[in-house]
Image (spheres, rainbow, N blue to C red):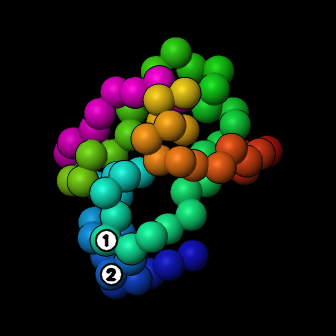
Amino acid sequence: MANADEVKKNTGFSIGGVSPVAHTSNLDILIDKSLNRFPYIFAAAGHPNCVFKITYDELIKITKGSEKEISE
């Protein structure tokens, strides 16, 4: 796990508001397959008090993320 300074350096966002897109570094994005059960997902939008609504398929597309079984 990254600490707060590492998160800010690698994503450009402070913890609590890390968006899945628009990072300052090229990062591998992992998306939990279990999220596909929801019609919509609400993701952080760059600030702890901001989110955006997106479908699972749209999230995969805009992040070029890899689907993984992360949760148990």
Q: Are marks 1 and 2 in contact (CB under 8 Å)?
A: yes
Q: Quadrant of residue 33?
A: top right
Spatial separation of the CA atoms under disc 1 and disc 2: 8 Å
Q: Is residue 58 above or below residue 68?
A: above
User: Is residue 26 at least partly visible in the picture?
Assistant: yes
Please, what secondary structure does the residue beneath circle 2 have? helix
Question: In the rendering, at what x and y percent does residue 3 appear?
Answer: 44, 81
Q: Is residue 31 above or below residue 42?
A: below
Question: In the rendering, at what x and y percent does residue 12 appear?
Answer: 27, 70
Q: Is residue 40 left or right of residue 18?
A: right
Residue designated by label 2: 9
Q: Which of the pair 22/40 is nearer the observer?
A: 22
Q: Is residue 1 left or right of residue 18?
A: right
Label number found at residue 2:
none
Residue at 45% from the left image edge and 70% from the top image edge: 26
Residue designated by label 1: 24
Question: In the rendering, at what x and y percent does residue 9 appear?
Answer: 33, 81
Residue at 69% from the left image edge and 33% from the top image edge: 34
The quadrant the C terminus occupies is: top right
Residue at 41% from the left image edge and 51% from the top image edge: 20
Q: Is residue 7 magenta?
A: no
User: Is residue 16 at least partly visible in the picture?
Assistant: no
Q: Residues within 10 Å of mark 2 (few under 14, many from 20)?
A: few
Type of residue at label 2? Lys
Q: Is residue 63 left or right of residue 69?
A: left
Comparing marks 1 and 2, which lies closer to the viewer? 1
Please, what secondary structure does the residue beneath circle 1 have? loop
Type of residue at label 1? Thr
Q: Residues within 10 Å of mark 1 (few under 14, many from 20)?
A: few
Q: Which residues are magenta?
A: 49-56
The quadrant the N terminus occupies is: bottom right
